[in-house]
Amino acid sequence: MRTLERAVARTGVLQVDSVNVLQRAHYMPLYSRMGAYDPDLLIRASARRPRRLVEYWAHVQALMPVELWPLMRHRMDHYRSERGKWGFVADPGLEPGILEAVRERGPVTARDLDAEFSGPRRKEHWGWNWSDARRVLDFLYLVGDVAIAGRNGSFEVLYDVPERVLPPAVLDLPTPSPQEAVTELVRRAARSHGVASAQCLADYYRLRLQPGAGAPSTRLAIEQLVESGELEPVTVQGWRRPAYLHRDARLPRKVPARTLLSPFDPLVWERARTEALFDFRYRIEIYVPAAKRVHGYYVLPFLLGDTIAARVDLKADRGARVLLVQGAYAEMHAPPHTAEELAAELRRLAAWLGLDDVVVAPRGDLSDALRAALGQ
């Protein structure tokens, strides 16, 4: 658990996503940093007392350390004034009753409250045709009136009141001003990055780089951190935009990394940064029609040393207990031993997922070498 906490302290947040073709997104960044850890550690940290992590809209939907809750209150206030996000409509008349039901029965799913509070499910918006209860619960979550206590076996959200989810010491923390909150979030983003542009720092916690008048400012936060000596303005070879180095960042003599990265890993969130640092152009093709995909449905970058050397389209066939490599592609700068290192990493990943074998399809310029390295 201490190792998990150290890993989350470095990443700051773990993006949550429902796609389960390989492994849920929030489990993968810890695997990339810790190796074959016990996934129950993350469940204990986020769904059992004493909670160390809680879900909120910190990057997008994400698990974050519980101490970030007060830093999100300015965001909760914004969602309250805007009545949510993306223009979805929650019936304010249902809010008191649903909030009281959560207080009396929580933790509960939206499905638990549908019969009492929801009318017929809307069908006009695929993917967003939430029930009335779900819409209200999501609004109450955005504004901080309810919190997420965990998820059930079907990955449905379990809602409860914050005082039963978060430690009392966290709820009792004073609320910082919006600018104080933004400055602390920029500070944390800078620690996670090491070196970053202003856009990188803003994107990490989805802050506005150019806010409206009177709104908290990422640029002001950067200026404050430069003035205090926490950030140092620097230039980075090959970057056009100015950059900032955190004072605690260290340049290692060697980077002995070898791991696969989730499409939602913080290392590759900000696509312009990924391309500038690694010369690696990356796009998620989940929503691209199959015939138009370039690399595949669920493609993971392969980090080898300080290079993203390859990418693989992976699927866990749990029925056959096989890790399927549906495509394997080398990058232009991949070292000669990439296939052998990738084979070893795929075996490690398969074992962590409880799978017995790795099977490589004949797709991609690295597939033949990868099959040979696996002895296929």
Image (cartoon, grey):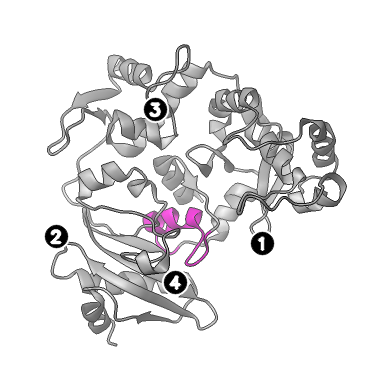
The circle on residue 309 is: none
Q: Which residue position holds label 2?
A: 333
* Type of amino acid under label 1: Ser
Regarding mark 1 in the picture, which secondary structure is present there? Answer: loop
In this rendering, the answer to whether 359 lies above or below 28 is below
Q: Which residue position holds label 4?
A: 315
Question: Looking at the image, can residue 271 be seen?
Answer: yes
- Image quadrant for the C terminus? bottom left
Please state the horizontal and vertical placement of residue 142, each as a whole percent of the image: 63, 34
Q: Which residue position holds label 3?
A: 186
Categorize mark 4 by other alpha carbons within 10 Å: few (<14), some (14-19), many (20+): some
Left or right: where does residue 96 sit relative to residue 196? right
Q: Nearer the viewer, residue 128 or 180?
A: 128
Q: Nearer the viewer, mark 2 or mark 3?
A: 2
* Type of amino acid under label 2: His
Question: Looking at the image, can residue 165 be seen?
Answer: no
The circle on residue 154 is: 1
When asked about the image quadrant of residue 134, the answer is top right
